[in-house]
Amino acid sequence: MTDTEHRVHAVARAADGTALAYQHEGRGHPLVLLAGQANNHHWWDPVRADFHGAHTTITLDYRGTGGSGAPAGPYSTPLFADDVVAVLDHLGVERADVYGTSMGGRVAQWLAARYPGRVRRLVLGCTSPGGPHAVERDASVRRALAQPDPARAREALADLMYTPAWRAAHPGPYTTLGDADMPPHARRAHLRASSGHDAWDALAHIGAPTLLLHGGDDRLTPPDNLALLADRIPDTRAHLLPGARHAYFEEHRAEAGGLVAAFLA
């Protein structure tokens, strides 16, 4: 275990023996931060410090990303939730707040539904219930992300994450555009895991008070999913951030972070 720039890095083991790299930092009540598809813990780097006044933040590199193992798969959002519990067990954390964005929000849904005693409060950002009930991105978005030129596909993703004005003022590099070192099989497994997510029936079993956040101009995960989640999860409050795209938590850092901090407090 090493401490670099006040962030402690360690490794837990999943039930199947896969190495799970995790990181914790700060002091206070534990807060698990879950990143988007095909991303590692660096997803949270731009805003992580905002929570350290009241929380110890805990992240992990999903299997297939960062310092974690990359078994052949298949992967799923319930499996990722099991991996989070393995990390919490390794840390000796019985109960934590959980904040998941994008695919991390999908993982967080399973975590709260399957392990209700482990989640005190839940924040779901820019995410959806998945399955046939979800509102999916339109075909033009799918085509833009699937184009064969990696540079153009990455540019399309950046445009879905941030507004042009914000990108002009913040030229990057951005930490939300995927783990460039992922092996191809793991990248495909992440895509299948997120695409195969369907927690519709499980959402009614989430007992933790839940805050829902979504960007009003999010084309990657359309904002109509906010109402779907609000209708299915028993104890929710929802907030739409007008003008925000998928990475609302970074571009609208002050507003979004303030809402999360007030809810968790």
Image (cartoon, helix red, strand yellow):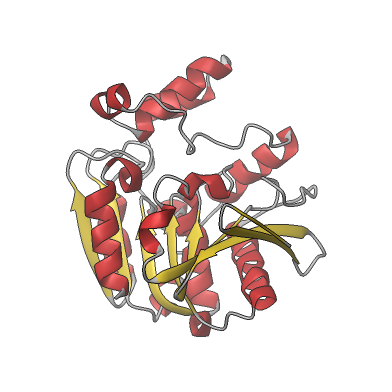
Q: Residue pushed farthest right?
A: 17
Specify the quadrant that holds the N terminus.
bottom right
- Residue 78 pos. (x, y %): 60, 64
User: Which residue is pictured at 36% across the width and 67% down the height?
Assistant: 53
User: Which residue is pictured at 63% across the width and 31% down the height?
Assistant: 180
User: Which residue is pictured at 29% across the width and 21% down the height?
Assistant: 168
User: Which residue is pictured at 32% across the width and 36% down the height?
Assistant: 219
Task: Judge whether 158 appears above or below 69 on screen.
Answer: above
- Residue 251 pos. (x, y %): 29, 40
Q: Is residue 161 left or right of residue 68?
A: left
Task: Judge whether 5 appears above or below 25 on screen.
Answer: above
Task: Judge whether 242 appears above or below 238 on screen.
Answer: above
- Please indicate, yes or no, whether residue 143 appears anywhere in the rendered image: no
Specify the quadrant that holds the C terminus.
bottom left
- Residue 2 pos. (x, y %): 71, 59
Depth check: 99 or 75 in front? 99
Depth check: 20 or 114 in front? 20
Depth check: 137 or 249 in front? 249
